[in-house]
Image (tube, helix red, strand yellow):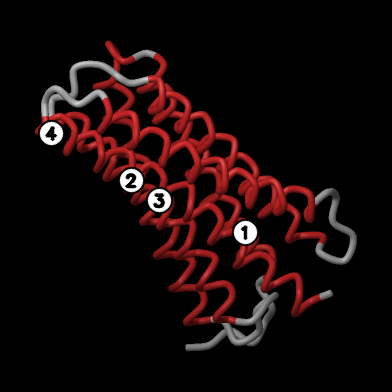
Amino acid sequence: MFSIISRDKGFFDLLERSAEVVVKVATAYAEVAHDYPKREDAISRIRQFEHDGDEVAHRTLEMLDKTFITPFDREDIQALTLRMDDVIDEIDAASKRLMLYRIPEPTGWFVKQTDVLLRAAKLVAQAVAQLRKLKKPDHLQEHLVEIHRLENVGDDNNHAAVAELYDNATDPILVMKWKEIYDLTERAIDRCEDVANAIEAIVLKNT
């Protein structure tokens, strides 16, 4: 049954919770890279965060089905929710590969990419928080521009990482494993840009 009462605060709360999970997952992933001997603990937390993210996304979409008046277009709320969940899923998939493939140690490019991803995730959270005050946002456009810039940095890093991988290859199986992990990490950065695009669509329609 639809609610005819605008539940702006509820939607904003849930969107911000999703963004918080994005930051938590990206933080744990960077911890994996920077403190690899303790990776099992961080990867375990990533798995729990992924479940948390799914729960928040489900609650948001459920509220969307039951609410008649929404703060933004329904499809934009849905897109933003799903894009943030995509970021979480890509990181979860990448972290699982590290354990599944028994990666012995991180590479410099892996560390660098997790740092780029974490910066993009934090900007996602800052941008989502600005949706509460869309008429007078603080630095929202700067956050979105920086996410786009970081996506380009992530692309460049990924290309360089894969090129170095092939140039210095001694174990073709390990090359295949790292190629997949690099690609998943880069895709997580791409998904942050998808979130920025979803926010930009909201801004264009509501300002």
Q: Residue at position x 24%, y 43% from top? A: 180
Query: Which residue position is annotated with label 2?
Result: 183
Q: Which mark is residue 100?
A: 4
Q: Nearer the viewer, residue 171 or 114?
A: 171
Q: Residue at position x 53%, y 88% from top? A: 2
Q: Within 10 angstroms of label 4, few (less than 14), some, or many (20 or more) residues?
A: few
Q: Within 10 angstroms of label 1, few (less than 14), some, or many (20 or more) residues?
A: many
Q: What element does badge 2 sit on?
A: helix
Q: Residue at position x 69%, y 46% from top? A: 146
Query: Which residue position is annotated with label 3?
Result: 187
Q: Nearer the viewer, mark 3 or mark 1?
A: 3
Q: Is residue 70 above or below residue 100?
A: below
Q: Position of residue 179 (x, y in %)?
A: 25, 39
| Mark closer to the chain start, 4 or 2 | 4
Q: Which mark is residue 71?
A: none
Q: Position of residue 71 (x, y in %)?
A: 70, 75
Query: Which residue position is annotated with label 1?
Result: 196
Q: Is residue 22 left or right of residue 120?
A: left
Q: What element does badge 4 sit on?
A: helix
Q: Amino acid at mark 1?
A: Ala
Residues under numbered marks 3 and 2 in contact, where contact means CB atoms less than 8 Å apart? yes
Residues under numbered marks 1 and 2 in contact, where contact means CB atoms less than 8 Å apart? no
Q: Find residue 196 and report its image quarter.
A: bottom right
Q: Residue furthest right?
A: 136
Q: Amino acid at mark 4?
A: Leu
| Mark closer to the chain start, 3 or 1 | 3
Q: Nearer the viewer, residue 171 or 116?
A: 171
